[in-house]
Image: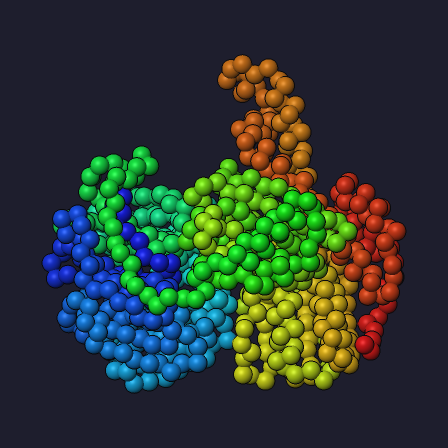
Amino acid sequence: MQLELTRINYGSVNTTLPNCLKLLPTRTPKKQQKIAVGDLDGNFQIFSVKASEVQLTYQNYIGSKISSVQISGVEGTLLDKIFVASDYVIKAFTKKGKMFLTFDTNLTEPLKSMFVSGADLFICGNHVYSHYRDCKEIGTYLCGDTIVDVAALCLNNTNRILTVLACSGRVLRILENCRVRQIVEVDSVPTVLHVLKNVLGNRILCGFTDGKIILYNFGQFAREIKQRTIVDATSRTSAVTCIDTYDLLGDGVHSLIVGRRDGTIQVFTMATDEDTDIECRQLYNELFLESISAVQGGCVFSQGWSEIVVLLFSGNIFGLTTQIIDASLTNKETVKKPLTLKNAKKVSDPNDAKTSNDEKILTSLLEATDMNQSSTSIQNKLTSALSSIQVNDSLTLDKHDKTYNLFIELPVPMSEIILQSDIMINIIKIEHEEHFTIKEVADPQHNYFIRKIKLEENINSFEMKFQTIEGQYGSIEALIVPSQTTHNVQTKSYTIRPLSLHFRSHKFDMSRPLNVLSLKGLFSQSEMHHWISQCIPEVPERLSTIEVSHLYFENSLIGTVLECKYSKGNAEFRSDNLSTISILKDFLTKEATKKRLRLEIITDISEPSVAHFLRLISDSITYCFKIKKEYTFLQALLQVDIRNDSDFNSLMPEYQSILKKRTQIEEDFKKSKIILDKYFGIVTDFYMDRFKFNGVIVRDKIPKLLEVLQNFNMNDLLDMFNTSELGDSHLQIV
């Protein structure tokens, strides 16, 4: 069974963040519900729909951007109290808009996420978590990682409360009484948490940046946690931004509603307690080309008809109802007469007006780009540009594709994006490329690259996948030009670190042959932490309070590992990749030189790590050559006159398989040359690093190495790395 939904436009507010729209519950099932919504301009509104018209119940300008809207109430009563988080303050309203609580949290950082359960209030900034009961502080917790979302649940309907913190360090922290009871390691960065109330007991859903959704089941004790993947990430879906569960089909079983960053809305069946082994089945999938800030299942437009209320990043609000009105969304049509919703008045901002100077700056920059003129920085040319538009952007590493994903979105259509990078990047894919016109300008003298991207009308977002080269670091700057001249040009800068392909892990394989880099000097622990954060992605922003810090990383492209152990005056790095040690040594030495610090550097090179590294990378190189061979056979087979099944069956099974996989082989062959060149570059750098530690320059042997790689043989490659004699570990003073 597939859901057929009809779109109904309810209106729009200003730009929004996730978790800023809720439906107020009713005592009678399938009765029309009110909508509570808050936006980044501080507007908070409650409205309903009567006779196909919006009826505004409450409207107010709170005074600062709204980061979260939650629904709760006294246990045993209707949970229709609305809690709104704005900056450092939480305000609570009744369903009619009467404010009955104003609570100043006095936190040191603005509120980012919130969860309310009865008299318990759980709030988080970037790093600080606080638990309040009846507005009295129960406890706090300082997290080194950035806190993405928070949720809480009572185990087996007891008084025991477990708090779950979704953290950017690829972990879920389970807290009880504001103390960490368990850390659950996850493969990707979590983005959103959703508690299943009165559905599956002590269970919580978690969405991730790689598109996966996992269901966690908490047992009687905090450490009894079972997990099951509800939605897999094999299809490389976009990051999950919001989750809800609701009985859309009217069969008493809740469906899973998912909103994603690329504008996709999906509906899946959910297994009951008795059918936990049944896989989820997709009932609905539609793309709306704008980030989804919130999805809520309920009944708004027409009594008795279920629907999904959707809030977009731009502030547009619409419903997807099961009631057939005019047209189905499967035919790409919507209701012709959308409903209207007025925005709340807000205090005027002196930065809202766009100055003529901004237009002159933009014009001069675009003209310089057209004439292939180089520039040191886009940011320097826009020092006077104002920031009146909220930009929804992110740069994340996809460890499955081994690529970076750059996402940029405005609440208004964009006319142009100019990307400037001071390092070489290889663009792999641009989502919905048919909507863009790309012009590339390069200045090899300054190692300077510009890509000028023009967008079609009514395109709000841009998404690009690209590859980086470890050891090359710098920044990518984006100049974003809105199509409306009343809005300001926006600039964003993204840092590419030296070890850009590494991601945070929580395990370290001690059985591998490890190279060691040891540093001693008059540096503090916080200084070393800062240097590491500038070199490796996903390093916690805050330094842990323990005397010796440990961090583990993994290379997404090769699979090598890295351990960082550091304290005041001492740091040790261990890796089975010699190039990783070389990059770290060069970068940390450079940073210490800037501070005029004297470093004692000791390297201990493991000979077995060389063969270990080559074996790790050989499988990928062999696969690329296999694809090349299959493509050669495919071209020959396409010349064979095969007229019927009898001719096809007369071929060898190997050749039949190649013909059946024609499309896949052709796609893989297009990628294989780029991938093969990348691996050849990695082996070449590794070859130079392998001998650099002994002061031997082998640049003149690179052509011979490339010849060996082109005629790939593992034994010949090992011989190339054993042609010179290496010395023992040595001591340097910088």
Q: Which residue lies furthest to the front in this view?
A: 356
Going by the image, does 273 lie left or right of 597? Answer: left
Residue 140: x and y in percent read 39, 82
Q: Quadrant of residue 56?
A: bottom left
Tell me if residue 239 can be seen: yes
Residue 297: x and y in percent read 25, 54
Tell me if residue 2 can be seen: no
Residue in view at x 77 percent, y 41 percent = 710
Q: In this view, does 523 lie above or below 659?
A: below
Residue in view at x 35 percent, y 68 percent = 347
Q: Which of 297 and 247 is in front in this view?
A: 297
Going by the image, does 607 lie left or right of 505? Answer: right
Going by the image, does 267 lie left or right of 483? Answer: left
Residue 725: x and y in percent read 88, 61
Residue 197: x and y in percent read 25, 64
Name the image quarter holding the N terminus: top left
Residue in view at x 66 percent, y 38 percent = 626
Q: Which of 36 and 693 is in front in this view?
A: 36
Name the image quarter holding the C terminus: bottom right
Going by the image, does 292 lie left or right of 430? Answer: left
